[in-house]
Image (spheres, grey):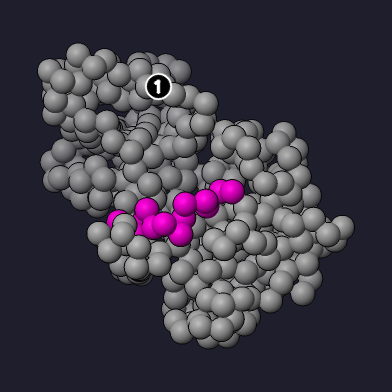
Amino acid sequence: MKSRAAVLYGENQEFKVEEIEVDEPKENEVLVHLAATGLCHSDYHMVTGEYGPLHFPMIGGHEGAGVIESVGPGVTRVKPGDHVLLTFIPSCGRCRFCSMGLGFLCDMGANLIAGPQPDGTFRMHTTDGQDAGQFCHLGTFSEYTIVPEASIVPLDEDMPMDRVCIVGCCVPTGFGSAVNKANVQPGETVVVFGIGGVGINAVQGAAVKGAARVVAVDPVDFKLETAEELGATHTINPNREDPAEKVVELTNGVGADKAIITIDNVMPEHVGQAFSAIRKGGRVVVTGVANARHQHIDVSPFELTLFAKEVVGSMYGDSNVYADLPRYLGLYRAGKLKVDELTTRTYSHDEINQGYQDMLDGKNIRGVIVYDWAR
């Protein structure tokens, strides 16, 4: 079938919205008619080359919600007409990591950003016959997309798809970084470096867990103001004061209990700065994506040992797809997790490049494309 999609043909290029061909779903796959998709910085890393070599052309997009159009053989969890949330972490439930409760490291996600589906083949094609990759097996920048059944979570029909689409990525990644990986405890001090779509949810997670101080760090004042509205007790603009020094001052010389790095492009020095901001025995959680070429972080091994500090990575906020995403949606329904407030602006499909420019200019917490049929 035909679909309109935002196609990326190579690094340092803009997305081109054009017609493509989409195959029928194969075994254990579904065809989804997307209602909306978030504009995450993770997709823009393909433009700037942080991931290294990828398959091009590529259909970006990995935060999406829509309606099942049709299903392939073997699909049992959903049927045509069902509303679904797409998650960029497939979870097979059978591999070693899923069986250990680490579904966010499922073997099906081994080649998430490479382009093809898990079986190594392609479901999308340009009009001139080129195979088009699907970022994270999803490609939600196409109005119609084929995805593995393992990449979908059922949605109640009263959930607004143009709002909850971002629960597929930035909400679990940020919220989970605080509640799961950082394991924030009541009364702790937590500092979050980088207040975009992921960081704002780390702020929310720390607040929900009862942190006494939630310190938001970002060079954009608008984002700091939004962080205060959603749970931050203190804000720091690194262009005006040193975050590590300020956090140590706020804690009477002790340092933060936890630091979460959700910066869009993590540099070695960012990890070092967070490391300096935490107390003895404190923990740094690195959630933001770094350039694949970086092979070190600016951390003192001497201090790592003698102060028993920790630096750990977090994938998807250590959130398990089928257990945690329904839980986060339940918190949203109960009004304890803000989701509607995260979308700063919605865009048409043709405005995708403007949406990403607004992201780069610091104008949005999260931009969302709403497809014409769902407006």
Residue 286 seen from this side: yes
- Residue 107 in the magenta stretch? The answer is yes
The quarter of the image holding the C terminus is bottom right
Q: Is residue 97 left or right of residue 362?
A: left
Q: Quadrant of residue 97?
A: bottom left
Between 183 and 309, the residue placed more toward the observer is 309
Q: Quadrant of residue 276?
A: top left
Please give the name of the residue rendered at 35% of the width and 25% of the height, measured from the top-left corner: 271
Between 193 and 88, the residue placed more toward the observer is 88
Identify the amino acid type marked 1. Answer: His
Point out residue 119 in the picture as x, y percentages from the top left corner.
57, 63
Region rendered in magenta = 101-114
Considering the numbered disc 1 on the image, is that residue within a helix, a strand or a loop?
Answer: loop
Q: Residues within 10 Å of mark 1 (few under 14, many from 20)?
A: few
Point out residue 340 in the picture as x, y percentages from the top left corner.
46, 59
Point out residue 290 in the picture as x, y percentages from the top left corner.
47, 32
Point out residue 147 in the picture as x, y percentages from the top left corner.
57, 68
Please give the name of the residue rendered at 60% of the width and 59% of the height, measured from the top-left corner: 120
Q: Is residue 133 left or right of residue 80?
A: right
Residue 371 seen from this side: no
Between 37 and 335, the residue placed more toward the observer is 37
Residue at the limit of the structure toward the right, as seen here: 128
Question: Relative to residue 81, is residue 19 depicted above or below?
Answer: above
Please give the name of the residue rendered at 18% of the width and 26% of the height, measured from the top-left corner: 309
> Which residue is labeled 1 in the image?
296
Q: Is residue 190 left or right of residue 167?
A: left
The quarter of the image holding the N terminus is bottom right
- Residue 156 in the magenta stretch? The answer is no
Question: Relative to residue 321, is residue 267 depicted above or below?
Answer: above
